[in-house]
Image (spheres, helix red, strand yellow):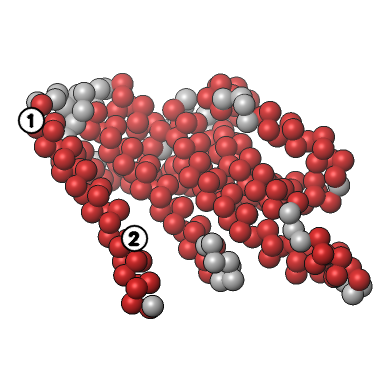
């Protein structure tokens, strides 16, 4: 049984990487045969070459974007936890504000970003605000929905044992809501990089978004794809970190 499980895990790690490698080689071959111009679709080898050539510049932009994304992500977590706990405690507030949260997500962030530039300027604050807005919703929804389905019998049992509200929250509600919480975190952390890049498009001194804008304006498709590769790698890496943390903090949860 252990051997079978380890084989499955090995396949899960190898097969995606093998598929991506074959896809890259196939793309390289198709572009070569079809003689597609580099400014339309660059060869993967050319993109890799750009990554190596601009590694120092790209590293500086990547650090900036990660800083903005993580700062906004952490603030979004704090706000989401506070607001979801309040809405769970006071049902009237949930009834009033939950629909407003849903409606707020129908407004395209790209439409609001220029206003944030006017309000907060071209500094890091604008980028952090955009990231907070992008990350906040999936976290707060996962928490609100998770708290709503906590086993009421367990809560009643704790109350019958004269447990304090804080004990009920920490010993019953928190463990029960953790799977939903980490599901929201995994969605939000990938959004955080996207949010930072979108904010940087509109004006920044540094960041993957500004590098991407410069690449598009100069028709350097290889630089554009190199930037995209970094965005994907960073997003997947952050997703994996949150997933790993969830497994360590929730050993009882088989779904993780």
Rendered position, 7 above or below 45: below
Q: From the viewer's perspective, is 40 left or right of 165? A: left
Q: Residues within 10 Å of mark 2 (few under 14, many from 20)?
A: few
Helix, strand, or loop for circle 1? helix
> Closest to the observer: 179 or 121?
179
Helix, strand, or loop for circle 2? helix
Q: Quadrant of residue 42?
A: top left
Residue, disc 2: 12
Q: CA distance from mark 1 to mark 2?
A: 32 Å
Q: From the viewer's perspective, is 13 left or right of 110? A: left
Which residue lies at the image location 16% right of the left edge and 40% below the top edge?
A: 26
Which residue lies at the image location 63% right of the left edge and 40% below the top edge?
A: 137
Which residue lies at the image location 48% right of the left edge and 45% below the top edge?
A: 190
Q: Is residue 34 visible to the viewer in this orientation of the structure? A: yes
> Closest to the observer: 216 or 17?
17
Residue 153 screen position, x and y as percent: 82, 64
Number of labels in the image equals 2
- Which residue, as the protein is rendered here, is positioned at the far bottom? 2
Q: Residues within 10 Å of mark 1 (few under 14, many from 20)?
A: few
Rendered position, 99 above or below 48: above
> Closest to the observer: 88 or 5?
5
Front tag of 1 and 2: 2
Rendered position, 216 above or below 247: above
> Closest to the observer: 21 or 116?
21
Quadrant in which the N terminus is drawn: bottom left
Residue, disc 1: 33
Residue 113 screen position, x and y as percent: 55, 26
Q: From the viewer's perspective, is 215 left or right of 108? A: left
Residue 44 screen position, x and y as percent: 19, 39
Which residue lies at the image location 36% right of the left edge and 27% below the top edge?
A: 213
- Sequence-earlier tag: 1 or 2: 2
Residue 104 screen position, x and y as percent: 67, 29
């Amino acid at each position: 049984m252990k051997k079978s499980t380890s084989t499955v895990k090995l396949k899960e790690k190898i097969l995606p990487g093998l598929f991506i490698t074959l896809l890259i080689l196939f793309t390289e071959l198709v572009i070569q045969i079809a003689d597609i111009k580099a400014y339309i679709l660059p060869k993967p080898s050319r993109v890799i070459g750009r990554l190596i050539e601009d590694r120092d510049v790209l590293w500086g932009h990547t650090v900036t974007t990660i800083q903005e994304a993580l700062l906004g992500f952490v603030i979004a977590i704090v706000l989401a936890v506070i607001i979801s706990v309040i809405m769970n405690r006071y049902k009237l507030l949930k009834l009033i504000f939950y629909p407003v949260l849903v409606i707020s997500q129908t407004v395209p962030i790209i439409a609001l970003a220029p206003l944030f530039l006017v309000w907060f300027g071209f500094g890091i604050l604008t980028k952090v605000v955009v990231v907070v807005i992008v990350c906040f919703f999936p976290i707060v929804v996962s928490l609100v929905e998770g708290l709503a389905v906590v086993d009421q019998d367990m809560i009643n049992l704790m109350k019958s044992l004269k447990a304090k509200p804080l004990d009920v929250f920490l010993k019953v509600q928190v463990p029960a809501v953790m799977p939903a919480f980490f599901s929201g975190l995994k969605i939000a952390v990938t959004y955080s990089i996207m949010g930072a890049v979108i904010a940087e498009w509109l004006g920044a001194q540094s960041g993957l978004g500004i590098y991407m804008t410069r690449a598009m304006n100069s028709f350097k498709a290889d630089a554009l794809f190199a930037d995209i590769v970094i965005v994907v790698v960073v997003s997947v890496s952050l997703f994996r970190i949150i997933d790993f943390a969830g497994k360590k903090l929730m050993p009882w949860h088989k779904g993780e």
